[in-house]
Structures are given as C-alpha cells and as structure tokens.
Amino acid sequence: MSRTGPYIPESASLHGGIQSHPTRPIHILGVPLDLGASRRGVDMGPSALRVAGLEARLEALGHQVTDAGDVHVPIAETRHLGETNARYLAEITETCTSLAAMVERALEDGATPLVLGGDHSVAAGTVAGVSAFYRRRQQKIGLIWIDAHSDINTPATSPSGNVHGMPVAALLGLGPDALANIANFSPKIDPENTVLVGVRDIDQTEKENIRRAGISEVYTMRDIDERGMRAVMEEALRAAGRGTAGYHVSLDMDWVDPEDAPGVGTPVRGGATYREAHLAMEILADHGRLLSFELVEVNPVLDERNRTADLAVELISSAFGKKIL
C-alpha cells in the first residue's frame, strides 16, 4: 500500500515471549558506479548483492520489498576523467543527482530507501535525497558513517583525486561544490549529528578536515577495541539522533576486516570482526530510528565465491531486524 509520508515503525509485537521487529516497505535502489574509485569492479556490487538473495531475505523478515532497479551511470570509457584532483566529478554528480531524486520518491511513497553501491561517492546522492525530504518538513537528519576511512577529503586535499574519498566533505559543505550543492542546498547534515564509526585509515589532511568541519563524534577501531561495540554504537546512535528525525546509515564493506570481507577495493587490516559487525547492525535495528540505509564498495572482481556480498546481505538483514532468537 502506498503511503504519503515517511515510514514510522509500528509497535513491536510479542510472539511466544520473543519481541519481533517492526516490518516496513523497502525500496532497493542499485547504483553501479565505479567512477569514484581507482580499482574497477564495484559497479558489479549491486548485482552481487541481488545474486546473494537480498530481496528474499528481507521478505522472509516480513518486509514489503520493491526492487526499483538501477540508476543510470555513465561508462568511464565513454567520458573524459576531467580534473585529476576530482576524477569524473561531472559524471558522478549527474549520477548522484538522479539517485537523490529516486531516494526522495521512495520516501514520499512511505518506503525506506536501501541503496546498493557502487563506490562510496554514491552517498552524496543518497544523503542529499533523504536530507531534502526531511528539510521540506523542517526536520534535519543524522549520519552514521561506518567505514575504515573518513572520506572527508576535498579536491584541494585529496592525494588521489578519487571522489569516493570525498562524500563526507561534500555533505558537510566543504566541497567539491558540484557534489555539495546537489538539490540546491548545503550542507546536508550538521557536524554535531555526523558520526564516524570504525575508522582506522585517515589521511593527515582528513584529520585537519575533521577538525575544520567540527565533527566531534569519531570512533576509531581503538575505541571499539577498548570500549566494545555496544558502547560505541549506543553513543553513536544517540549523537546522530539528537534533535533529528532519525539517521541515514552508510556502511562501507571495507569496515569489516578483510579476513571476512576480502572483496573490497581498499582493504585495511584490523577491521570489525564478523560478530562485531552483526552486533552493530542488531543494535541499529533495536533503536528503530533508521530512515535509510546504503551498503557500498563490494567488488566481485576481488571477492572469493561472493563471500563479501553474502556477508553484506547478512548485515543488511540484521540492520532490518533479523535476530538470533
């Protein structure tokens, strides 16, 4: 059934003494974009997640799932890379602008957008769409960025010129301007509601940009090691939810240790374990304030028998309510 406003979770019910999760309409949006990364192959990520049974697993949890297909993405070989400090910026902005409109439409239909990347530059479009929807309702949103990297470089600070390292900067209004101004407003999120979780590979220039942007909620893997995933996630969700309609969650699979998630373009040792990753998603589901979700950077070319995509689908399932008991 189509709705005319944002999804509001129904009350959880009890079956046999066990609390069940609320169900919701979900719109899957694929974004086969690899223009923002150096290593090719993440454009096949959405297909790998579908092959791993994403829709069926969400439907088994009781959700009403609609696969809205893929956003059109220009082919790299047919375009010029543009400025070397922000490669394919025009094409990425074009894709993210289309994605933002699709995300807004999903929310207007009362559904939760579930975006499948593609490289992490897609987040500039996803968050633009969610933020624009709630902005029209005089509300703001939070952002939970779960990633090995902070992705807060700009064209002036990026050592590579790869735009998948710039979306957080764009969302906070630091640039690049084309991405920052999607939907004709900037910033998309406030720094006090922006939370980085599990980072462990940050450029020196990014450290400076984090301070410049005013982000105070940064949880490194050391924080998770010392304090545990539960404490970190509880604090992260409180910060992102403070004074907001809820939050968008952006999960890069390189956050998980490469022992469990080998099929990513920029693996970094020392990431979240299999159970830590599931616990984070389970806590997210328990809080019930998820507005939208995206999962990015699955690269089947680098994967082993679709292991990373299989794990990604498991984590999405946990985020949408799958429980052990």
Image (spheres, rainbow, N blue to C red):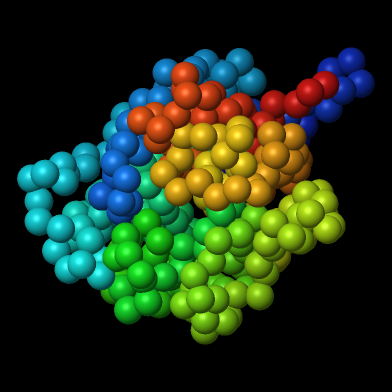
Q: Residue at x 62, y 63 (%)?
A: 195
Q: Residue furthest bottom?
A: 212
Camera-side residue: 57 or 12? 57
Q: Residue at x 41, y 70 (%)?
A: 153
Does 139 sit left or right of 239 as displayed?
A: left
Q: Would you identify the image quadrant in which residue 199 lies?
A: bottom right
Camera-side residue: 198 or 323? 198
Does 12 sit left or right of 319 as displayed?
A: right
Q: Would you identify the image quadrant in which residue 144 lies?
A: bottom right
Q: In this picture, is 4 found above or below 139?
A: above
Residue 229 in the image, given as x and y percentages of width and height: 78, 49
Q: Would you identify the image quadrant in which residue 42 lies?
A: top left
Residue 204 in the image, given as x and y percentages of width and height: 51, 76
Camera-side residue: 139 or 20? 20
The number of numbered discs placed on residues in the rendered structure image is 0
Residue 24 in the image, given as x and y percentages of width and height: 58, 31
Inspect this view and state whether residue 280 appears: yes
Residue 22 in the image, given as x and y percentages of width and height: 69, 31
Q: In this picture, is 309 found above or below 109?
A: above
Q: In this picture, is 233 found above or below 315?
A: below
Q: In this picture, is 49 found above or below 227?
A: above
Does 4 sit left or right of 322 as displayed?
A: left
Inspect this view and state whether residue 10 appears: no
- Quadrant where the C terminus sits is top right
Q: Residue at x 26, y 50 (%)?
A: 35
